[in-house]
Amino acid sequence: MFAITQTKPGGPETLQWEKVSDPTPAPNEVIIEIAASAVNRADILQREGNYPPPPGASDILGLECSGTIASVGAALTLDRIGERVTALLPGGGYATRVAVPIGQVMSVPEGVDIVTAGALPEVACTVWSNLVHVARLREGETLLIHGGGSGIGTMAIQIARALGAQVAVTAGSQRKLDACAALGASILINYNDDDFVQRIKDETAGRGADVILDNMGAKYLMRNIDALARNGRQVTIGMQGGVKGELDISAMLRKNVGVFATSLRGRPDSEKATICREVEKHVWPWIEAGVVKPVVDRVMPMPEAGAAQTLVESGDIIGKVALATP
Amino acid sequence: MFAITQTKPGGPETLQWEKVSDPTPAPNEVIIEIAASAVNRADILQREGNYPPPPGASDILGLECSGTIASVGAALTLDRIGERVTALLPGGGYATRVAVPIGQVMSVPEGVDIVTAGALPEVACTVWSNLVHVARLREGETLLIHGGGSGIGTMAIQIARALGAQVAVTAGSQRKLDACAALGASILINYNDDDFVQRIKDETAGRGADVILDNMGAKYLMRNIDALARNGRQVTIGMQGGVKGELDISAMLRKNVGVFATSLRGRPDSEKATICREVEKHVWPWIEAGVVKPVVDRVMPMPEAGAAQTLVESGDIIGKVALATP
């Protein structure tokens, strides 16, 4: 098969597209002939040497894919060969083939083309697990999403709306805020112009956000706590603003709030499988009904993964960048 | 009526027992003729000037009581006058009479004498709300309780056992650890001899605690996170080890853990009423069945509240110190 490989950690120039040996499936794994993968910020951290793959995972980049089941491991029946699927991967998506545990294989939502489908697993599983299981977002609550125009952000806006929540977003340009509004966000905060803490309080009669989906980590820690309503929950899923920050526990205690930090990749296979089943059951029907739309800014050829990552790093996109195999 | 009053913040010597005017009930309040209250660490902070009462609350110390309904507010029917009750108070418990919203009035569990009952509301409501609602402790999980010999600790051990959890405790003496064991704790950690992080890992095959009930705040923040299992939840309800500490968000993210800080006193009346109804429904039957036992180290006369607080501060007690009205 072909894959994006890398000889040493570094910038996008360290990536190349070349022939490598095919993966072999463990007994409970399938081999997917990949149609598309997509860029995640975690891929960029891994490329730079700052996010090593978990033990046992491929060292090829790529946390999601779509494609067709080409073969199956010894413990699995053959009848799924040829099925069009999507999958949440521990790695190995920037390639023409990948091995993945059967539990992390999902269907392709009806009406979604196979390339777009390759950009769905990470955002759907991340948003569902964090909003529903971790933060327990409820109907009528207010969710604040930092980076509303990102892949995660565009999916989180729509899933939160489908759950009956009001959505606030931060973003760095009017173009992104317009896109967020079109997806269902009703409180639009340009972080270059406004203080998000003050704005979210102003827009909620002083209450604040019930849930915050955060990608900044340390930089926003205390401001997020300030922006939370009583009994609010913050979930950090990215640390673009640093990993260590001072926590004022008394500020949390006064409002009975909780701070979580989670990653999808580090979860054991059993938890990932549970999340995948729930996403198939709850999120795919919303996509099939047109309630939730995949947001793919553009599709690039997988051999140009380095350029695609640079585009994601620039922040100048809305939604995901998909990588189609040649 | 008589009450403990204070002319300026300070030590126990600033407290005196003297005649003051009777409280008058708001329309939805009852007046309780108090049989007993009990000492909470929050009372000591308030005495020192470090924990002002919430707006509208009595400036008399005391967050719980037992007694008899003496009169009722204009919006309430008279048929409850004479009923023996317990109550969660926003303040005013160190007195012979107190006004309290009807939603925070609970029954007296059968088989519990009226003085012991005065030491139940704070620990029962605090432990129930934090273990069940905030931390969502489940059957088969492991709970680590810091200060297992305290009023909160002795109640938390028993409620967690009743919920089907395994219980680990920290305490500073073998006498306290023995008491915790008698109440159902199975992992006993003397913090003077052992590192609790290492011990909890050793005792759980490396997993750690699913839930930690913490009274130390900043001092234990990162050690608690280290001691948590995957998907673990820490709940800080006291800050005896400081309010501000450095948080390493990446350490949380690797394990998908959450950190909460809560206080019962700051909750709005509607939330307190919900908690009181659940405590009556779930905790009182456990007490009536002998599954959960109130742990009162000793009963002191309410006029000696200062000496009782000094005893609680010394840490040389197991469970609660009740204050009986003369």
Image (cartoon, coloured by chain):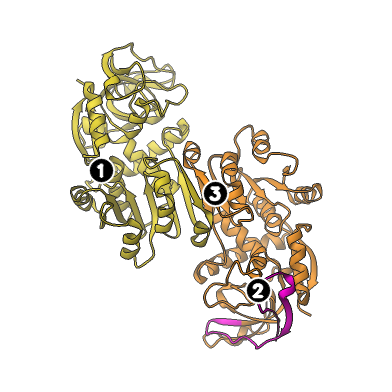
Chain colours: A orange, B yellow
Magenta stretch holds residue A24: yes
Which residue: 71% across, 51% down? A148
Residue B141 x, y percent position in the rendering: 37, 59
Q: Start and end of the magenta stretch?
A: A1-30
Question: Please, which chain is the residue tagged with disc 1 on?
Answer: B
Q: Amino acid at mark 3?
A: Gly
Residue A6 x, y percent position in the rendering: 68, 78
Residue matched to label 1: B287
Q: Nearer the viewer, mark 2 or mark 3?
A: 3
Q: Nearer the viewer, mark 2 or mark 1?
A: 2
Residue matched to label 3: A245
State the image quarter where residue B30 is shown: top left
Left or right of B48? Residue A38 is right
Is residue A219 positioned above or below A18 on the image? Answer: above
Magenta stretch holds residue A20: yes
Q: Nearer the viewer, residue A275 or B258?
A: B258
Same chain letter for marks 1 and 3: no
Is residue A235 positioned above or below A279 on the image? Answer: above
Q: CA distance from mark 1 to mark 3?
A: 43 Å
Q: Which mark is residue A61?
A: 2
Q: Nearer the viewer, mark 1 or mark 3?
A: 3
Q: Amino acid at mark 2?
A: Leu
